[in-house]
Amino acid sequence: MEQKTLAEHKQDRRTWVLEALGQPHEPSDPHRYVWKPVPAGDANLAPLAVRLLRSVAERQRWCAHLCESEAGAQESFGN
């Protein structure tokens, strides 16, 4: 039985998902995003309910894309 660390399992899952989605396996840039506190009352910030619904919708799109990719892979392998 192979003993992997949590980090190794995480990397394996990441690699599998990227391959399933047809994305290049490149390390992400740690400086890709800049995180700053948002001042209260900022007009550019959507209400919390809207932000949560957008996150849920994005997650549903990801899951649908992953399911489509898995179905396509199963068809191509004849399962």
Image (tube, rainbow, N blue to C red):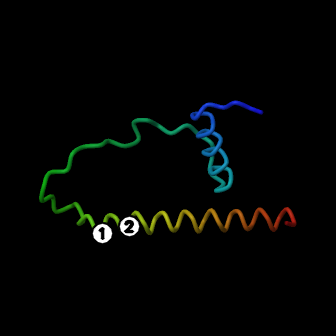
Helix, strand or loop under label 1: helix
Q: Are marks 2 and 1 in contact (CB under 8 Å)?
A: yes
In the picture, measured across the screen, residue 70 lies left or right of residue 40, that is right
Give neighbour class at mark 2: few <14, some 14-19, many 20+ (Cα, 10 Å). few
Query: Which residue is most to the front?
Result: 1
Mark linked to residue 26 = none
In the picture, measured across the screen, residue 32 lies left or right of residue 26, that is left
The residue located at (66%, 54%) in the rendering is: 22
Which amino acid is tagged 1?
Answer: Val
Find disc 1 in the rendering and name its residue. 50
Helix, strand or loop under label 2: helix
Query: Alpha carbon of mark 2 to alpha carbon of mark 1: how far?
Result: 6 Å
Q: Is the residue 7 above or below the residue 25 in the image?
A: above
The residue located at (52%, 67%) in the rendering is: 61
Mark linked to residue 54 = 2
Q: Is the residue 30 above or below the residue 18 in the image?
A: above
Quarter of the image for the N terminus: give it.
Answer: top right
| Image position, residue 49 (x, y; %) | 28, 68
Give neighbour class at mark 1: few <14, some 14-19, many 20+ (Cα, 10 Å). few
The residue located at (23%, 66%) in the rendering is: 47
